[in-house]
Structures are given as structure tokens and as C-alpha cells.
Image (cartoon, rainbow, N blue to C red):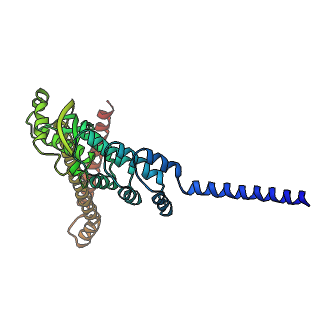
Amino acid sequence: MDELQIGGSFIGIVIAAVIIIILLIIFLRFVPVGLWVTAYFSGVKIGIGTLVGMRLRRVNPHRIIRPLIKATKAGLALSTDQLEAHFLAGGNVDRVIDALIASQRAEIDLEFEKAAAIDLAGRDVFEAVQVSVTPKVIETPRVSAVAQNGIELIVKAKVTVRANIERLVGGAGEDTIIARVGEGIVTTVGSSEKHEEILENPDSMSKTVLKKGLDSGTAFEILSIDIADVDVGRNIGAQLQTDQSEADKNIAQAKAEERRSMAVAQEQEMRAEVVQAESKVPLAIAEALRQGNLGVMDYYKLQNVDADTEMRKSISDQADQSDEEE
């Protein structure tokens, strides 16, 4: 009996230990004690209840506390509510904190609300801060432009820009800069009387383009526009003249063909009238013989003249054919 009691007590102790271990595992999984300890020794004063509340709000505490530790070490005064609100809005908390630290080191005035707005607008706020500190070079595609003398120039430019933090929200991006620079190049080349003017002084083209204020309304500030390459392309003026001449020739040929068709039609119509008139000749002769206006001898003479005419025509056709064969 004593052995059974001892055995039952041991099993009860084991079951209780297992239950305690399971509850402890669940507690440690639900309550990030390790994260709380890390935050405490990093100088971030946060309560266990706050971490539990994040779990209940379906917020990963590591996504909030680790960036907060980084910000605290950098001397930024931020709260968990600010970071959690940005996280729930779909923002990247870690990227915003990196941007704030980078801006602080570069002595750029950037508030958390501004950085969060830039991040929520879909722009990489950390990259924007980097470009604001270190200018970025944007290379344009090859732009084709034609001078007034009809010569095509193919220009490639490099645009050095710096991010404008104040205009990142709502400002146009790199594609707008490239499009405006391309438009400025086309306008500058098109206003030149000769393409040699651009080839001799390509710097004048970059200066003219810079004066247009192409960075207005964009998220960047243009520092310089450098012409990287200028190639001479086709003679567009000569090609246009050739095409125009070809078009004029086709029009003239079409008009000539129209006149020829009209002449052929008129000739066919006249031949039909001749045939119709010739068909009435035998009837007229018969009527003249009947009325006595034409004698028999006159009729025979007319027949001889007609036969003589046919013979002469046949001889002439044979001679023409012999000449063509020779």
C-alpha cells in the first residue's frame, strides 16, 4: 500500500512538472522576457505589460523594440507608440530609424513624422538621406535631336542630383528628371543653326538646359548636367528632301497614268464611233443605188479604190514589221 502511494505521488509530481514546463514555455513564447531583458540593459525602459499588449494587438515586439534600442543608443527620443503606429500603418520602422540616425549624423533636420510620411509614400527614406548627403548621378538614354541644317545629333548626358528632403512627398522622381533633360537637349539642338556649333561647344548645351529649372516640382535638386557623348547621326534634311522628291515623282506618275487612261478611253470611244459610222456605209451605198444617185460603174470604181487602199496598208504594215525585226 505504501509503495502504491509512493508511486502515485511520483506520477503526480511528474505530471505537475510537465504542466508547469508547458505553461512556462507558453508564457515565455507569449511574453518575450528575453527581449525585455535586452531592452532593460540597453537603457530602454519598457514594461512587460507593454510587450504583452503588442502581442495582443498582433504586433511583433521585435519589430518595435530592436529599432527603439538602436534609436536610444543613437540619442533619439522616440516612444513605442510612435513606432507601433507607423508599423500598423504598413511602414518600415527599421528603415525609418536608420534614416533618422543617418540624418542626425549628417546634421540634416529630419523629424520622425516627416521620415514616416516619406516611408509611407513609398519612397526609400534611408536612400533619400544618403542621396542628400552624397549626390547621385543619373545617366540619360541616348537622345536624338536635329539641328536647323538637318543634321541629327545623338546626345548622352549625366545628371548629378541631390535629394530634396522637403519635396520627397509629392515630388516627381528620376523619370521626370530624365524626360525634362531630354526635352531640354532636343530644344537646344533644334534652336542651333548648324550642328557644328554643338560639337564645338557641348558645354553650352548643358548650361542652356540648366537655366530651364528642370528640378522644379521634383524630389531632387540638379547640381550639374554633363554631356557625356555627342555623335553625328543621319542627314535628316537630305532624307526628307529625298522622300519629298520620291513622293512628288509618285504623284506625277499617278497623274500621267490618269491622263493616259483618259486618252485610251477617248481613243476607244472614237474608234467605236468610226466602226459605227462604217457600218452605215453599205446601207448608204445600197440606198444610193436604189435611188439612182450612184451608178454601177461608180460603185465598181469605189470598190477598186477600197481594194487599192487595203493593199497599200498591208504593204506598209509588212515594211514596218521588217524594220522592227532589223
Marker count (numbered) = 0
Q: Residue furthest left?
A: 193
Q: List x then y, in percent, for residue 152.
A: 19, 35
Q: Nearer the viewer, residue 310 or 123?
A: 123
Q: Nearer the viewer, residue 208 or 258?
A: 208
Q: Quadrant of residue 84?
A: bottom left
- Please say whether residue 231 is visible from this viewpoint: no
Q: Residue furthest top?
A: 200
The residue at 67%/54% (across/down) is 21
Q: List x then y, in percent, for residue 257.
A: 24, 50
190 relative position to 313: left or right: left
Q: Residue furthest front?
A: 2
The residue at 9%/30% (across/down) is 197
Q: Quadrant of residue 2?
A: bottom right
Q: Nearer the viewer, residue 122 or 97?
A: 97
Q: Quadrant of residue 87?
A: bottom left
Q: Is residue 60 above or below residue 316?
A: below
Q: List x then y, in percent, for residue 203.
A: 12, 31
Q: Nearer the viewer, residue 87 or 26?
A: 26
